[in-house]
Amino acid sequence: MLKKKLVAVALVGLFPLGVMAAGENNIGTCGWGSKLFDGQRGVAPQVLGGTTNAIGSQTFGISSGTSGCTQDGVVKSNWKTAMFIDGNKEKLARDMSIGNGESLDSLAKLMGVRDADKPAFFLAAKENFARIFASDNASTDQIVASLKQVLAERSDLSVYSTAI
Amino acid sequence: MALGVFFVRCVHYFSMARWGLCILLYVLPFAAAANDYLDELISAARAKHLADQLQWRALLHYKPRLIFSGVESQADDPEFFNAPDGKTNPEHELEATLAAFFSNRVETPTRQNPQCRFIARYQWLKRELKFDPARLPEQPCRRYREWRDTLNPDALTLVFPAAYLNNPASLYGHTLLRVDAQDQDERTRLLAYGINYAAATNETNGLTFAVKGIFGGYPGLFSMTPYYSKVTEYNDLENRDIWEYELTFTHEEIERLLTHAWELGPVRFDYYFFDENCSYYLLSLFDAARPELRLTDRFPLWVIPADTVRVVTEEPGLLRRITYRPARSTILRYREQRMSAEQVVLAKAIARGTEPLAAPALAPLSDVERARVLELAYEYLEYSRLRGEAPDAARAAARLRELLLARSRLTVAAETPPPTPPVRPDEGHRSARVSIGVGRENGAGFYQLNLRPVYHDLLDPEAGYNRGAAIEFGNLVVRYREQEERARIERVDIINILSLSPRDALLRPLSWRVDFGLVRKPVNSADDALVFRVNGGAGVAGEWTRRSFWYALFEADVNTNDHLEKGYAIGAGPAAGALIDLTERWRVQLEGRALRYGVGAVHSGDELALNQRVTLGPQSALRLELARKHEFSQTTREATLSWSYYF
């Protein structure tokens, strides 16, 4: 029990919320601040092959501040998982509450979860729903941090806690 | 090494002038050598008539000019061309492009070398002219390579978000392209990227958007988003079903398409709603991949997204597989039908908060039933929230989480998804229609011709279309009356939109109609004339059974014509009707309206109609329309039998 708490504290200490160098881990801000069940938002489309500040990227009505995470319209690889979570919170919450779903499958793929581990991964997410989505306006950072903790606590899934 | 020789030679000179001369003397031979190679390439290109070839035409989007001879590119951005007259001169453009490839410009995040900026042209010309890398060094084009490698392309899918009529902006559907990755499987399509062409604007005023969109007032741009973002936008925010058509383009063709999409990204093409719209430019990407397809040439006048899906699905061997992705509203209706009425009402109450989450009514339900009620409550509340209809946003968010939390405590498998509809949008009747008919009007015979370029009305065969949705542009009816021995225009529907959406326990949409055009009707107790009419109405619709529904609207009607007393008449009144599908092919419609015109030429206009349609084949149908009209004390009894052909 104590060991679990120490591990938890250590993990929290390693991932303070706020700006982090992109190379160190996958979580930073990259401009997003959207919350669960918040409002309409999505990924701003980027114009291909042009300037990163081309008019296309600002003119479409829905957007979240995801500039800096993408170059020429594709997501820089170290932001991919976090950006997917950021853009699919409600769907992920719904899929986790049921224990399966397309968005959850996609998250598992992004995190590199092996097929054999998927049932345990889905079950862990479902059983810990209350922790992962701790509030009804949870931010991406909070959700990711909670998910990491949940995975780290299980010996069969702890290897994936570093994948996000 | 060349630099080393330069320093060895030039370092012996001390004065600036001589430095300059040295540099010039050293560089000029290189410049001259580059020009020599350029001249060689240009000669080779002329000898092979490369500027006339389909691939060059496809990459530059050249189309024959309407009035003058020659061609003109549809690109409206000077940055797309290397020659000053590139827009109209394929040969000059090709030669200027070759010259541009010799540039030394270094790539930055905001600017590319011409070889990379025009990479599809570069790759094609390199293959055709067999560029010598020693004489024309190849640029690394890192930005393109990284983009392409991230996409990791394996296949292309044409994505068709179908029309959802209560949203006028979605009238004709839309098409976008999805680039499927090598490591993608059945369950991870969401991670692919979508390429989308759309008008770039923040306009929210529907009318301004419609007018400017029709007349080329917006730039159209190609953009890229993760596919999951598009699914959310269409399925959840706009409640449109999505159809995914996987295509069989080869890897080489996909490379050609992607290099061309890269070229097109920052290029402005004026967006024209009717003919140079999202679907047209996606077809132009397919033409770049496989120029023999010549898909854009098949649409000289106007382009409807569903028609572009048709040409793709009908091209032999191009279609691999089709997947269906229902909208949230479709899912809600499907689930409602699978639950008892009490459970649907309970789910709605729990969603709205009028029943607590631990409602006593939930207790006797089995785990599966309880799971379904919670899921329906969640989907319904999320649907309302995204439409801005949830009264208290903060409470809605809290309730949504509570619903999911309660669901997470139940070990019940997911609900089955709605089945794929038996008829796809591209399998419905074609968009244009011609009808010929005979009839009697107050005992006198007539012949009738009806021409409609687009799109669908309540009596056309419904398979593949939305129930209760009708849109017509440019519908023309001409009648030849035997007694008068002349043909006259009976009506011209410039725009006619009708959206009848049945209400149920959960979804309560508004039904509405808008139409304006010309219609021949009585203007006083003796004469008739072609009257300009604007009509709008709003109301409700409901379903009796899966095959029958009713509607009731309140309409306002404005008529103008010089022969009307005071030149105009403004009226209002109720309209109601029912649609019944007696069999799969046989539909009956009963409709009545009573308009009272109180302003201008005061009068009343009543109408009662009984219409029937029998579908004969996928592209033909028979109609019998009976009507009794009374206006300005003129009574008209009319019967028309017509045969329609869709093409």
Image: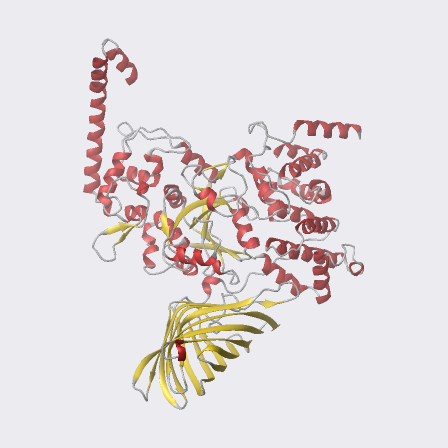
Q: Which residue is located at x 41 percent, y 54 percent? A: B279
Residue B249: x percent and y percent? 41, 49
Residue B29: x percent and y percent? 20, 23
- Of B79 and B319, nearer the camera is B79
Q: Which residue is located at x 55 percent, y 61 percent? A: B420
Q: Reply above or below: B550 against B28.
A: below
Quick one: which residue is furthest to the bottom in this view?
B443
- Of B474 and B119, nearer the camera is B474
Task: Give the image's coloring scheme.
Answer: secondary structure
Q: Quadrant of residue B437?
A: bottom left
Q: Which residue is located at x 65 percent, y 29 percent? A: A15
Tell me: B402 left or right of B136: right
Q: Reply above or below: B75 against B167.
A: above
Q: Reply above or below: B60 against B473.
A: above
Q: Reply above or below: B528 against A29.
A: below
User: From this viewpoint, is residue B126 visible?
Assistant: yes
Q: The N terminus of chain A is located in which quarter? A: top right
Q: Quadrant of residue B352?
A: bottom right
- Of A44 and B117, nearer the camera is A44
Residue A148: x percent and y percent? 67, 35
Tell me: A141 left or right of B349: left
Q: Which residue is located at x 45 percent, y 60 percent? A: B172
- Of B129 and B604, nearer the camera is B604
